[in-house]
Image (cartoon, helix red, strand yellow):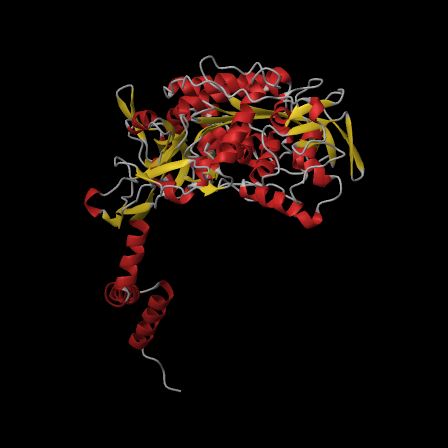
């Protein structure tokens, strides 16, 4: 083996030492290659971002900056017939936070700029938002660019918040419903509920019935947001214009409504009734000037009301009317030529029909009444004798022509049809109870419409609640004029109207219903009250419905009390005084002068010696 030279051995030793401890040149080369590799990756990524994926990256960045804000439509107002506001939308603010920006909140404290962050923001905001810093703090913490922290904030409060200059705190315009008439109009105007966020929707009354007219169409605006949560002024994008809702004008007179509501609420409380209602309708047009229901509710505090209060009982309650329905039976008998107001009726103390023995409210000896007297004294037996000659199918036709069995033309939410049993299905005794108002059912609106028909010379006008609509600031566009339907002839309506005057005259059941200077026609009603929950009768329904001036009717007023907590309640004693006050107010408010005409004074009795004559009806000689 050849010997290794000393020089070669030294070079080998140096290479081994260099490999063992890392030669500077080798390290430099390694660092250079690593840096080149990293920069190559960066360059490739830069090329990808700026060349191949530029559009998507830019869009992602833009999407992160863009904020879309819904611009709510201003909900239309609800007005009374004279332009008084019953419901309107008032501006409020929805306060939001960009949680990333609020962290940077700084304040000048003791002449020094101090970063107070989220805690400092919570401490300043909480009192203005009616909360505590501890409750607000979790709402401000996080990484969300958008979070709602308060709703329905008054504009004055928002201006104070805005003046604090807290980064990331912003607001959006919203609207809250205001009801200046309060509980007096609540059952008819209705209320709104929040569906999601600041979106509200009508949930009762006109608010629900006219939802499509009132609601309008929301718009939107899109803007770019800086890192501190502030809007970039020059980066607002085109949005969608909001379309405000229409104003809806009602036929209701707010002052008359308040009067009726106040009086019926007092009477319900005084008599211990479970409910009561007053309806005021124009006799010649069918326009509803007041629809009051008690108990009522505060439309701004719906959550505190009972479910049974969030309704208009005048529209939605069904009940058996009792003697006020006798006007329909009498109208049918008059129209069919079976009786006249002067026809005699021999009224015994008891009358047997079908499977039942009938009696009047109080026992009495046999009475010799005219048909006018039967109505004036509200005799059930006399009504049966005078009207039973009208066939059941014909009587059903009259009931339906007067509006029973179908909802009114108003289209009020939850309005029932009322109950009229088809003639072929009427039981033995029901055939006769219907004649004096038991065994049929209706609403207070339908009952009022019956008397409107008589007051309007036999022509039934559809009940009307909406006068018209309008864009904000523009004239009201009236609803198309309603067309009437003739139910009975003018002669029959006139005869019946004169008979109804006998109810308030001497010998009638409502002699205390008097309005000085005016002739008044009307009818009392007291009926057994059927309760669904009991599946039986319990208590009474009492009512008085009438119109004035009787010789040129302008208004029909119907007053009803459900289940007054009194023994032997009467429509005259409980409802008559409310009728008098409401009718007097209406006549004076609309400046209706007395006509000065003399009442007809139809005879209520006939000469008993004429019993058995052709124009006298008795049990032994039934009508028809």
Q: Is residue 535 left or right of residue 110?
A: right
Q: Where is residue 573 shown, x and y percent of the image?
A: 61, 16
- Please state if 73 lies on the left or on the right of 622 as rendered: left
* Residue 447 coordinates in the image, percent (x, y): 55, 33
Image quarter in which the N terminus is found: bottom left
Q: Residue 346 versus residue 328: which sits nearer the camera?
A: 346
Q: Give the answer, above or below, for where 475 lies relative to 393.
A: above
Can you give x and y, in whole percent of width and height, for residue 260 in the image? 49, 21
Q: Quadrant of residue 218?
A: top left
Residue at (59, 21) in percent of width and height: 603
In the picture, measured across the screen, residue 338 lies left or right of residue 81, that is right
Q: Kindly tell me whether residue 464 is visible in this rendering.
A: yes
* Quarter of the image that includes the C terminus: top right
Residue that extends furthest to the left in the rendered view of this protein: 234
Query: Where is residue 480, by image quadrant?
Result: top left
Going 68% across and 38% down the picture, which residue do you hit?
Answer: 388
| Lateral position of residue 49 relative to residue 436, left or right | left
């Amino acid at each position: 083996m050849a010997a290794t030279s000393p020089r070669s051995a030294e070079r080998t030793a140096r290479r081994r030492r260099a490999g063992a401890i890392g030669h500077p040149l080798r390290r430099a080369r390694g660092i250079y290659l690593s840096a080149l590799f990293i920069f190559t990756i960066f360059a490739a990524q830069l090329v990808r971002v700026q060349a191949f994926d530029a559009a998507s990256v830019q869009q992602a960045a833009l999407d992160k900056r863009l904020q879309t804000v819904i611009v709510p439509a201003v909900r239309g107002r609800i007005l009374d017939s004279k332009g008084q506001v019953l419901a309107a939308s008032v501006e409020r603010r929805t306060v939001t936070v960009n949680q990333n920006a609020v962290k940077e909140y700084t304040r000048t404290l003791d002449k020094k700029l101090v970063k107070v962050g989220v805690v400092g923001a919570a401490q300043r905001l909480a009192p203005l938002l009616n909360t505590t810093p501890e409750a607000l703090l979790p709402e401000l913490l996080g990484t969300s660019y958008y979070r709602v922290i308060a709703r329905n904030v008054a504009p004055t409060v928002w201006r104070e918040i805005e003046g604090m200059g807290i980064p990331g705190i912003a607001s959006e315009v919203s609207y809250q419903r205001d009801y200046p008439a309060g509980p007096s109009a609540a059952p008819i105007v209705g209320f709104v509920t929040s569906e999601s966020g600041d979106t509200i929707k009508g949930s009762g009354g006109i608010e629900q019935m006219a939802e499509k007219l009132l609601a309008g169409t929301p718009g939107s605006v899109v803007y770019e947001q800086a890192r501190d949560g502030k809007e970039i002024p020059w980066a607002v994008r085109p949005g969608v214009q909001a379309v405000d809702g229409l104003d809806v004008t009602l036929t209701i007179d707010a002052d008359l409504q308040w009067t009726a509501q106040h009086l019926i609420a007092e009477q319900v409380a005084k008599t211990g009734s479970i409910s009561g209602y007053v309806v005021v309708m124009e006799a010649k047009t069918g326009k509803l000037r007041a629809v009051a229901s008690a108990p009522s509710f505060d439309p701004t505090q719906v959550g505190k009301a009972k479910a049974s209060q969030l309704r208009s009982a005048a529209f939605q309650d069904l009940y058996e009317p009792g003697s006020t329905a006798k006007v329909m039976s009498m109208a049918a008998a008059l129209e069919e030529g079976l009786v006249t107001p002067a026809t005699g009726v021999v009224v015994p103390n008891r009358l047997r029909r079908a499977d039942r023995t009938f009696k009047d409210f109080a026992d009495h000896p046999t009475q010799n009444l005219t048909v006018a007297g039967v109505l004036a004294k509200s005799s059930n037996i006399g009504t049966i004798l005078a009207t039973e000659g009208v066939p059941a199918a014909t009587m059903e036709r009259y009931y339906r022509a007067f509006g029973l069995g179908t909802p009114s033309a108003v289209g009020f939410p939850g309005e029932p049809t009322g109950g009229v049993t088809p003639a072929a299905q009427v039981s033995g005794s029901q055939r006769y109870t219907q004649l004096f108002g038991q065994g049929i059912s209706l609403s207070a609106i339908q009952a009022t419409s019956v008397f409107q028909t008589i007051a309007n010379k036999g022509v039934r006008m559809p009940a009307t609640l909406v006068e018209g609509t309008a864009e904000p600031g523009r004239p009201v566009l009236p609803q198309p004029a309603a067309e009437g339907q003739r139910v009975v002839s003018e002669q029959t309506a006139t005869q019946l109207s004169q008979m109804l005057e006998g109810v308030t005259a001497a010998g009638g059941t409502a002699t205390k219903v008097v309005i000085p200077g005016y002739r008044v026609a009307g009818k009392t009603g007291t009926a057994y009250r059927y309760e669904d929950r009991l599946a039986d009768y319990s208590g009474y329904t009492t009512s008085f419905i009438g119109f004035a001036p009787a010789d040129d009717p302008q208004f029909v007023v119907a007053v009803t009390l459900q289940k007054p907590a009194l023994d032997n309640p009467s429509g005259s004693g409980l409802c008559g005084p409310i009728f008098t006050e409401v009718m007097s107010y209406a006549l004076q408010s609309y400046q209706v002068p007395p006509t000065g005409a003399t009442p007809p004074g139809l005879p209520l009795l006939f000469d008993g010696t004429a019993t058995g004559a052709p124009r006298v009806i008795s049990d032994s000689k039934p009508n028809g």
